[in-house]
Image (cartoon, rainbow, N blue to C red):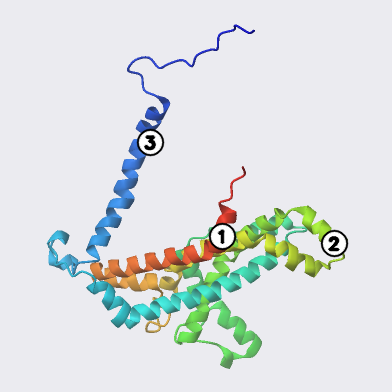
């Protein structure tokens, strides 16, 4: 029989703090800052959305409480808001589709090493690193009536083929789409390339042994494996494109008229041009709720797979 005494866990000295208590003390300042910076302004803005306050009417807490009047006005009567939401949604569908197609093509191209791979890889990622306001200004110059794009069109098709890009709603929308796709295709490219490089080799080899063609291997083995990566890429870009502001502001200011006015630009105009801060806050919270629902729906097919924990 083994009579060796079992060592006892050392106890903290009387009055000493446990590791958990020390951890809470050190995280308390960060939590306090988070509450002050994030939660308090959010609650103030939420309260503001139920009032008729504007900066010309005195203090916020002296403003009249109007309940859901701002929200009902936005959802029922404010056609400009509804068209801005619809326009942002359509821009999202077109831009994300093009970015996915171009990003996937580049990712497949870079699966194999070739001369100049490193240089081209860095070059293709460069647009993503440029500030949106700078990208907007660059393309505003490119799309000018006497800019490089029209000069190339004139050289190839003649002077009668040049376009006044910002005077027509159709061409202005095209300019916004081209700018957005050029700016953010590298993000899809980077995410999809990482996903392709992480595809397990065994299923691919098994499919090849069974006689599958390269096209069948790609669409029936590789793409289903990439499903979580693709959805995450779409979620990230969807959250960003809902906030599309800088490029549109620099390119068109929402014009001609309101033909390219996104929801972020419309809320900006409500708050800082018309000084309808309470009304703008209500619009912002509607967009917030809609964005949360969109992210929930997009992640639903792969949520269990993303949250799966090895046991």
Tag 3's secondary structure? helix
Residue at screen point 30% across, 81% down: 76
Give the mark nearest the N terminus, 1 or 2. 2
Q: On residue 71, which mark appears?
A: none
Residue at screen point 79% across, 58% down: 204
The residue beneath circle 2 is 208
Instruction: Residue 129: tell me if it is visible.
Output: yes
Give the mark nearest the N terminus, 1 or 3. 3
The residue beneath circle 3 is 27
The residue beneath circle 1 is 232
Say above or below: 206 vs 277. Answer: above
The quadrant of the image that shows the N terminus is top right
Residue 67 position in % (x across, y down): 21, 69
Q: CA distance from mark 2 to mark 3?
A: 53 Å
Residue 60 position in % (x across, y down): 17, 61
Q: Are marks 1 and 2 in contact (CB under 8 Å)?
A: no
Residue placed most toward the observer, 82 or 202: 202
Residue 125 position in % (x across, y down): 61, 59
Residue placed most toward the observer, 304 or 250: 304
| Disc 1 residue crowd, few under 14, some 14–19, many 20+, Cα 10 Å | some
Q: Which residue is situated farthest in the bottom direction here?
A: 160
Tag 2's secondary structure? helix
Q: CA distance from mark 1 to mark 3?
A: 30 Å
Tag 1's secondary structure? helix
Q: Nearer the viewer, mark 2 or mark 3?
A: 2
The quadrant of the image that shows the C terminus is top right
Instruction: Residue 240: tell me if it is visible.
Output: no
Q: Are marks 1 and 3 in contact (CB under 8 Å)?
A: no
Give the mark nearest the N terminus, 2 or 3. 3
């Amino acid at each position: 029989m083994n009579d060796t005494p079992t060592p006892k866990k050392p106890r903290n000295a009387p009055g000493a703090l446990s590791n958990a208590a020390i951890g809470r003390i050190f995280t308390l300042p960060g939590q306090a800052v988070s509450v002050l910076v994030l939660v308090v302004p959010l609650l103030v803005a939420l309260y503001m959305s139920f009032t008729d306050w504007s900066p010309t009417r005195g203090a916020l807490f002296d403003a009249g409480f109007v309940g859901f009047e701002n929200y009902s006005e936005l959802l029922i009567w404010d056609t400009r808001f509804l068209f801005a939401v619809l326009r942002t949604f359509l821009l999202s569908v077109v831009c994300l589709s093009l970015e996915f197609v171009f990003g996937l093509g580049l990712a497949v191209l870079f699966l194999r090493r070739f001369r100049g791979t490193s240089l081209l890889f860095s070059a293709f990622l460069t647009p993503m690193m440029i500030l949106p306001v700078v990208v907007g200004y660059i393309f505003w110059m490119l799309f000018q009536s006497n800019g490089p794009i029209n000069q190339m069109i004139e050289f190839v098709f003649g002077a009668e083929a040049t376009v006044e890009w910002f005077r027509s709603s159709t061409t202005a929308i095209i300019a916004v789409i081209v700018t957005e796709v050029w700016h953010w295709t590298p993000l899809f490219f980077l995410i999809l390339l990482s996903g392709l490089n992480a595809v397990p080799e065994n299923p691919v080899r098994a499919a090849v042994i069974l006689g599958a063609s390269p096209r069948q291997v790609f669409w029936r083995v590789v793409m289903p494996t990439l499903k979580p990566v693709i959805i995450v890429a779409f979620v990230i870009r969807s959250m960003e494109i809902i906030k599309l502001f800088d490029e549109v502001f620099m390119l068109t200011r929402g014009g001609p008229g309101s033909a390219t006015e996104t929801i972020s630009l419309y809320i900006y105009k409500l708050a800082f041009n018309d000084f309808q801060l309470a009304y703008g806050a209500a619009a912002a919270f509607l967009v917030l709720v809609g964005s949360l629902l969109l992210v929930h729906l997009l992640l639903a097919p792969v949520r269990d797979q993303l949250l799966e924990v090895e046991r």
